Image (cartoon, rainbow, N blue to C red):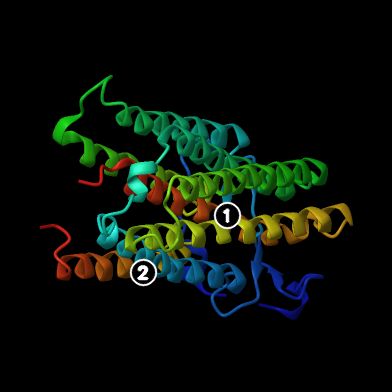
Amino acid sequence: MSDTATSEHSEPEADEVAEHHDEEGHAHPSDWAYVKIAVVLAVITALEVFTYFESVVDWGVALVPSLIFMMIVKFYLVATWFMHLRFDNKLFGRMFTAGLILAVGVYLVTLTVFEFWV
Amino acid sequence: MSAEAVTADPGHVADEGGHDEHATTTGLSHTKLAMWVFLGSECLLFGGLISTYLLYKTRGNGRTLPTDVFDIPFTSVSSFVLLMSSLTMVLALSAVTRGEAEAGRTWLLATALLGGVFIGGQVYEFTSFVREGVAFTTNPASSAFFTLTGFHGVHVSLGIVMLMSLFVASLKGKLTQRNAETVEIVGLYWHFVDIVWIFIFTVIYLIPAD
């Protein structure tokens, strides 16, 4: 059995220690921790929708950066907590981020070539 | 690894610490690894569709653009429903991993129902767009929009089929703690579909077109 396979998972924080382990022996969070993450996601979504109503608050030039930041936070929370990348072997995450980075790179170049930013 | 360490399931072995590991070259589940590789490749698919929409979103050929008929409050509710389905999905996995079959079934069904609500919302959105003059072939912007959101809808629908298959398997007693990884793999797919929608909701719906 490969040593790297068994040692390369990140350690969960003490207060979020799991109630159960998966079949690879990795700790998973409690149901309550998942609910707390869902509440955070719901609050961020509410904030995102809030930006749509310009009559309430005018976000000005901060609108797009704020929306992208909130999107990345939601993406990160779902990937690390609900998809267990935070607790699983890092190889899984590397496979996913390889595709993600390739996609972001390729399509940023594509958008630039087609003068999307101009 | 001794032959005695092999458990009843030929795909698993137990190490000295009592933890189950997979009898593979990496010590990891290759099924799960394959799902992660698949999800990585899906980033390229959706990246292409999103980029295409961004390039075409203002090309209306003098006709109504999708952005002119967006109903943000309605889509926000749909987004919230899909987001919460990720919670029910992870709770289903948690229950199955603990060996609580009935709770697992309930959460799986809840996830499928929430997915169904999202798809129902998308069907409503599409039909209302067509009524307002934005159909698939109206202009390049509408073609790109329907292709992107339609592909995502197909992914959600396939996810619902997988969830219902797990639900039926659980009813037949074939979904136990031992094969919880099947639920985890379907869950990964489901969460990915949610992640893609997080991206679409922000980039396509919320960020202003001009």
Q: Is residue B52 visible?
A: yes
Give the crowd class for mark 1: few <14, some 14-19, many >=20 residues within 10 Å.
many
Q: Is residue B6 left or right of residue B42?
A: right
Label 2 or label 1, whichever lies nearer to me, is: 1
Q: Quadrant of residue B205?
A: top left
Quadrant in which the N terminus of chain A is drawn = bottom right
Which disc, if any, is residue A74? none
Give the structural element (helix, strand or loop) at label 2: helix
B152 relative to B7, above or below: above
Q: Which residue is more in the foreground, A29 or B173? A: B173
The residue shown at (25%, 55%) is B58
The residue shown at (52%, 74%) is A2
Quadrant in which the C terminus of chain A is drawn = bottom left
Q: Which residue is mark 2?
A: A98
Q: Is residue A24 visible?
A: no
Pointers 2 and 1 in contact (CB under 8 A)? no
Instruction: Say which amino acid is labelled 1.
Output: Trp
Instruction: Say which amino acid is labelled 2.
Output: Ala
Q: Chain of mark 2?
A: A
Q: Quadrant of residue A25?
A: bottom right
**Residue B84: image x %, image y %?**
56, 38
**Residue B11: image x %, image y %?**
71, 74
Q: Is residue A46 left or right of residue B113?
A: left
**Residue B151: image x %, image y %?**
50, 62
Q: CA distance from mark 2 to mark 1?
A: 20 Å
Q: Which residue is mark 1?
A: B190
The residue lying furthest to the right in this view is B172
The residue shown at (58%, 55%) is B156
The residue lying furthest to the top in this view is A56
The residue shown at (32%, 49%) is B203
